Image: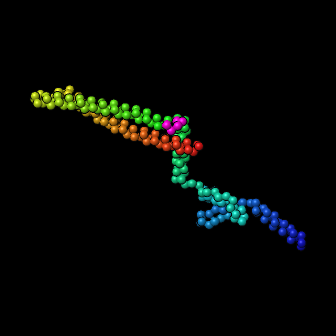
Amino acid sequence: MRVIITILLLTLFNAHIYAQGKTYFRYRNEQGVLVMSDAIPVKYVEKGYEIVDIYGRLYKVVPPEPSQEEKDRLRKKNLEKERLAKRDRELSLRYSHIEDIRAAKKRKLRGIDTNIFTLQLTLNNIAERIKEYQATAAANERQGKEISKETLVAMQQLESNKQLIEEELEQKKLDKQGVAKKYDQDMERFSEIQSTAN
């Protein structure tokens, strides 16, 4: 009898030792019931689960698989991170000091200002030529003469050119604002990079 009890106790003790080392999966089934098992069906894996021992002590939490929206958001976040990292590398390679960025900004804006000045001069010249044609046309009308077809075509062409140059001038002004903003952002980011590097 004593032998049987000893064997029984040893068996229980060994089972206890074995159970302590074994891990289980804890997950919620379709009904929302908490299940603990030594295997987990594939359909529950994506919903997340926990790895526990026989007593329910938690070893690891495996989070649910992200939804498509979360995956898309994460992908966008990673792409933005990569874009920023690339920009940071380019800034660090291109410039040694923040003064280099200020100088580059000044040069770029000076170039745009030159373009704006040139366009403005061209616009003024066109406006003067249009006035000359209009004066000639008005003088002809006062004298009872017809305005020549060539004059009308030339005036129309000048008006068309004037409109195109005005549009280009507006675009250059917008470009100037965009360039200034970009360099300001570059200076801000460069300062951040330098402060984290030090």
Looking at the image, residue 186 lies above or below residue 129:
below
Between 37 and 146, the residue placed more toward the observer is 146
Between 42 and 88, the residue placed more toward the observer is 88
Q: Report the side of 81 relative to 62 (left or right).
A: left
Where does the image place residue 69, in percent across and percent down from the top left? 52, 53
Where does the image place residue 125, in percent across and percent down from the top left? 27, 29
Question: How many discs mark residues in the rendered view?
Answer: 0
As drawn, which residue projects farthest toward the bottom? 1
Segment tinted magenta in the rendering: 95-99
* Residue 152 in view of the camera: no
Where does the image place residue 168, in percent across and percent down from the top left? 34, 35
Between 51 and 191, the residue placed more toward the observer is 191
Query: Residue at the spot x=58%, y=43% of the render?
Result: 197
Looking at the image, residue 145 lies above or below residue 5:
above
* Residue 33 in view of the camera: yes
Where does the image place residue 115, in percent across and percent down from the top left? 36, 32
Query: Quadrant where the N terminus lies?
Result: bottom right
- Determine the main secondary structure of the stretch shown in magenta: loop
Q: Report the side of 156 relative to 22 (left or right).
A: left
Q: Report the side of 47 relative to 188 (left or right).
A: right
Query: Residue at the spot x=54%, y=50% of the render?
Result: 74
Looking at the image, residue 93 lies above or below residue 17:
above
